Image: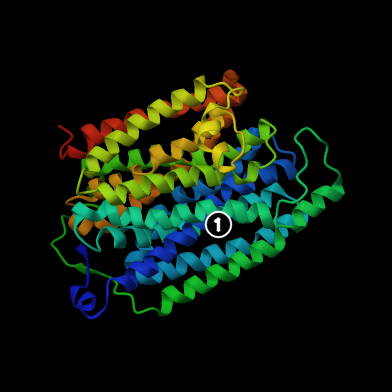
C-alpha cells in the first residue's frame, strides 16, 4: 500500500498547515537532539566523567533508535502519522521529567535512562514526520522540503545551547579544578526548572499535533507479495545502502555537533556549552544553499557528492590543524566581535556545513519507487539514527587508544567515503547482482 497525502483534504486546506505542524515537530526534535551537545560537557564536568564515560550520555540517546525503530513503524501504521507525532511528543515530555530526579540524586545511571527514553520518543516522532514531508509533494523537490524542516531543526540547535548556557551554566569552573559538593549541587539544581519547562512545552506540541486538522497519509491497498515487509524492503539495494548511509551520516553529524563541546572543554575554553551552536550555524548555511539550488541548479545526487567530498577535506583539516593557530577565527569570527578559537575546533564546526545536505539527499533517493513499502522503509531509515550512538563512542575510544582527542576525528573518514559511494553508485542500484 503506497503512502500518499489525501489530495482531497489538501485541496480543501492550505499546504501551510501541514508544513507548519511538521515544522514545529522538527523544531522540537532539534531542541531535544542538539541539547545533547550542551548537556554532555556540563554533566562531564558536574559528575567528573572521563571523555569515554561522557560519550555514553550521547550514545544512550541514539541507541534507543535500534530498540524503537521497527516498533515505531508498526505503531504509526496502527495509529496514523498525525497521532504518531502526538505520541512521540508525549513520550519525550515524560522522559524530560526524568532529568529532575537524575539531577537531585546526581546519578549518571538515571541520566542515561532518561536519555534512552527521550530517544525512544524522538524515534516515534521521526518515523511519523519524515515520510510525511517527503510525500507532501514531488520527489524531485523532496530534498528542498526536508531542507526547510532542517532549517527549523538546526535553528533549534543554534538557539538551545545559547539558552542553556545563559540559563543553566553560571560560574563555570575551569577544567582541572576540583569541584566541591556545593558546586555540584548548584549545577544539578540549575537543571530542574529548565527541564520542567521543556516537558511542558513538548506536551503543548503533543496537544497541537493531536487536535490540528492535519491531513494524514493515506495507504492505498496493493497486492501483497507474501514476504515480510522488512525483508522485502531490504531486498532493494538502494534502500539497504541508504540505511547504512544514514547510520554513518548520523554518526559524523553527532560527532561534529555533540563532541565539539567536550573537545573545547579539554582545550580549556570557558564557553564550551555553546560550541554546538557553531556547528548548527554552519549547517543552517548549508541548508539555505540547498533550498536555493535544489533542484533548479543541482540535483540531490550532486549535492550528496559535494557534501561527501567537503566532509573528507574538512576531517583532514581537523586532524592536521594546530591548536595554536587561530587563522580561521581571525577571518570568520574576530572581525565581527567573535572569540578566538583554535583552527581544529572551528573546523569541527565547519563539518556542519559539509553535513547539511546529506540527510535531505539520502531520504528521497532511498525511498524512490518503494510505493507501499514506504512506511516500513522509513522505519528502517529512522533506525539508521542509531549510528549516532557509534560516533561519540568511536571518538572516546580513539582518544583512549592513543589517537588523542584530535586524532580520533580521523575515524570519520570511512563514513564520508561510504556516503560518496552511495552518491555515485549506491542509490542507483536496483539489484544485488
Q: Quadrant of the C terminus?
A: top left
Q: Residue at x 50, y 37 (%)?
A: 349
Quadrant hosting residue 300: top left
Q: Quadrant of the N terminus?
A: bottom left
Q: Residue at x 17, y 67 (%)?
A: 221
Q: Is 411 or 13 nearer to us in this picture?
A: 13
Colouring mode (rainbow / by chain / secondary structure / one colour): rainbow
Quadrant hosting residue 46: top right
Tell me if 418 is positioned left or right of 193 in this view: left
Residue 275: x percent and y percent?
Answer: 58, 42
Q: Which residue is mark 1?
A: 117
- Up-down: is 209 above or below 66? below
* Res 231 visible: no
Residue 280: x percent and y percent?
Answer: 48, 46
Q: Residues within 10 Å of mark 1 (few under 14, many from 20)?
A: many
Tell me if 20 is positioned left or right of 433 in this view: right
Name the element at disc 1: helix
Q: Residue at x 60, y 33 (%)?
A: 341
Amino acid at each position: 500500500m503506497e503512502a500518499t497525502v489525501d489530495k482531497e483534504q489538501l485541496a480543501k486546506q492550505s499546504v501551510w498547515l501541514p508544513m507548519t505542524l511538521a515544522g514545529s515537530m522538527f523544531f522540537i526534535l532539534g531542541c531535544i537532539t542538539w541539547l545533547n551537545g550542551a548537556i554532555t560537557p556540563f554533566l562531564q564536568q558536574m559528575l567528573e566523567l572521563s571523555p569515554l564515560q561522557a560519550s555514553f550520555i550521547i550514545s544512550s540517546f541514539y541507541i534507543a533508535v535500534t530498540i524503537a525503530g521497527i516498533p515505531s513503524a508498526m505503531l504509526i501504521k496502527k495509529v496514523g502519522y498525525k497521532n504518531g507525532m502526538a505520541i512521540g511528543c508525549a513520550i519525550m515530555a515524560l522522559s524530560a521529567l526524568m532529568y529532575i530526579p537524575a539531577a537531585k540524586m546526581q546519578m549518571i545511571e538515571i541520566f542515561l535512562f532518561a536519555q534512552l527514553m527521550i530517544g525512544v520518543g524522538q524515534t516515534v516522532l521521526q518515523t511519523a514526520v519524515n515520510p510525511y514531508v517527503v510525500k507532501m509533494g514531488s520527489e524531485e523537490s523532496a530534498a528542498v522540503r526536508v531542507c526547510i524542516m532542517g532549517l527549523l531543526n538546526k535553528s533549534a540547535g543554534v538557539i538551545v545551547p545559547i539558552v542553556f548556557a545563559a540559563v543553566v551554566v553560571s560560574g563555570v569552573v575551569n577544567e582541572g579544578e576540583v569541584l566541591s559538593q556545593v558546586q555540584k549541587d548548584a549545577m544539578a539544581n540549575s537543571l530542574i526548572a529548565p527541564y520542567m519547562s521543556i516537558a511542558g512545552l513538548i506536551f503543548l506540541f503533543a496537544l497541537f499535533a493531536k487536535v490540528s486538522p492535519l491531513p494524514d497519509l493515506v495507504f492505498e491497498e496493493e497486492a501483497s507479495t507474501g514476504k515480510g515487509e522488512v525483508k522485502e524492503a531490504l531486498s532493494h539495494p538502494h534502500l539497504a545502502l541508504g540505511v547504512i548511509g544514514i547510520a554513518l551520516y548520523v554518526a559524523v553529524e553527532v560527532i561534529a555537533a555533540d563532541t565539539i563541546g567536550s573537545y573545547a572543554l579539554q582545550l580549556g575554553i570557558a564557553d564550551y556549552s555553546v560550541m554546538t551552536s557553531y556547528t548548527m550555524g554552519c549547517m543552517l548555511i548549508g541548508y539555505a544553499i540547498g533550498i536555493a539550488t535544489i533542484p533548479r541548479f543541482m540535483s540531490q545526487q550532486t549535492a550528496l557528492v559535494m557534501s561527501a567530498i567537503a566532509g573528507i577535506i574538512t576531517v583532514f583539516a581537523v586532524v592536521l590543524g594546530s591548536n595554536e593557530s587561530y587563522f580561521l577565527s581571525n577571518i570568520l569570527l574576530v572581525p565581527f566581535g567573535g572569540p578566538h578559537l583554535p583552527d581544529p575546533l572551528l573546523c569541527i564546526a565547519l563539518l556542519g556545513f559539509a553535513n547539511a545536505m546529506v540527510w535531505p539527499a539520502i531520504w528521497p533517493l532511498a525511498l524512490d519507487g518503494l510505493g507501499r513499502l514506504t512506511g516500513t522503509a522509513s522505519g528502517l531509515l529512522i533506525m539508521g539514527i542509531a549510528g549516532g550512538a557509534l560516533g561519540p563512542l568511536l571518538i572516546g575510544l580513539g582518544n583512549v587508544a592513543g589517537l588523542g582527542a584530535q586524532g580520533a576525528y580521523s575515524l570519520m573518514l570511512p563514513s564520508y567515503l561510504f556516503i560518496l559511494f552511495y552518491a555515485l553508485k549506491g542509490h542507483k542500484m536496483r539489484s544485488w547482482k
